[in-house]
Amino acid sequence: MWWIWLIAAVLLGVVEMLTVDLIFLMLAGGAAAGAVVALTGAPIWVQALVAGLVALLLLAVVRPWAKTLLLRSTPDTPMNVRGLVGQIAITLVEVTDRSGLVKLAGEEWSARTAPGVMPRPVGEDVRVVEITGAHAIVAPLDAPTAGFGTAPQPTWSANSPATGPGFSNQQNQGYGHGGPYHPGGAPQFRG
């Protein structure tokens, strides 16, 4: 029976490598403890109890410390939509304060100009000053970026029955989705 616990520990370790959140690593530690207890010939309920208690102990004590250590040693690199703020995009259609389209990081994004910025013509390089929902808010390259907001931290919705995992149905909420450039739903971001 010890080999089942060992396989579980290895599988949980593989999942941890994909998530890097230290939760599955702690569960793998519990499974490894279950394997050690199984080697002593203890009954399955004792193995499961030890595995569960060790996993809970690791989650409650070791994970917070290890996560703090990991975050302290990792540089604060903007990722996801936060990493797009400050990037240069090119306008694909005229961008106004109501609508537009830009090519940003190899993808087409709905876009609007920042407040007080004149419409930007097709083919102009612009700077992304904010990401609001699924819209890139842009300004000319020479415009100061101070005073503009920063990108919200994305939080993906759970499985929405209307649009599937990670999406929300915002088509009828005035966010500019649907039509020739953005069929279907769009990622939901909350600041």
Image (spheres, helix red, strand yellow):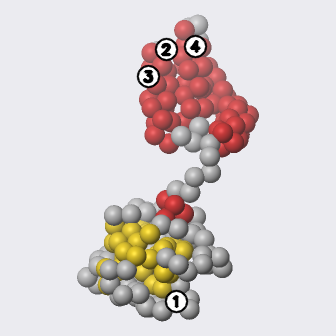
The correct choice, above or below, for 40 with respect to 122 in the image is above
Left or right relative to 142: residue 71: right
**Local secondary structure at mark 1:** loop
In the rendered structure, are the residues bearing label 3 and label 1 in contact, judged by CB atoms less than 8 Å apart? no
Q: CA distance from mark 3 to mark 4?
A: 13 Å
Farthest residue, direction left:
180
Left or right relative to 125: residue 56: right
Q: Amino acid at mark 2?
A: Trp
Residue drawn where x is 53% and y is 85% of the image: 114
Q: Which mark is residue 117?
A: 1
Q: Which mark is residue 2?
A: 2
**Local secondary structure at mark 2:** helix
Q: CA distance from mark 4 to mark 2?
A: 7 Å
Upstream in sequence: badge 4 or badge 2:
2
Q: Residues within 10 Å of mark 1 (few under 14, many from 20)?
A: some
Q: Residues within 10 Å of mark 4 (few under 14, many from 20)?
A: some
Task: List x then y, in percent, for residue 19.
Answer: 50, 42
* Residue indicated by mark 3: 7
In the rendered structure, are the residues bearing label 4 and label 2 in contact, judged by CB atoms less than 8 Å apart? yes
The correct choice, above or below, for 142 with respect to 70 in the image is below
- Given this view, does label 1 or label 2 mark the residue nearer the observer? 1
The correct choice, above or below, for 57 with respect to 104 in the image is above
In the rendered structure, are the residues bearing label 1 and label 4 in contact, judged by CB atoms less than 8 Å apart? no
Q: Amino acid at mark 1?
A: Val
Task: List x then y, in percent, for residue 51.
Answer: 60, 25
Task: List x then y, in percent, for residue 112.
Answer: 45, 84
In the rendered structure, are the residues bearing label 3 and label 4 in contact, judged by CB atoms less than 8 Å apart? no
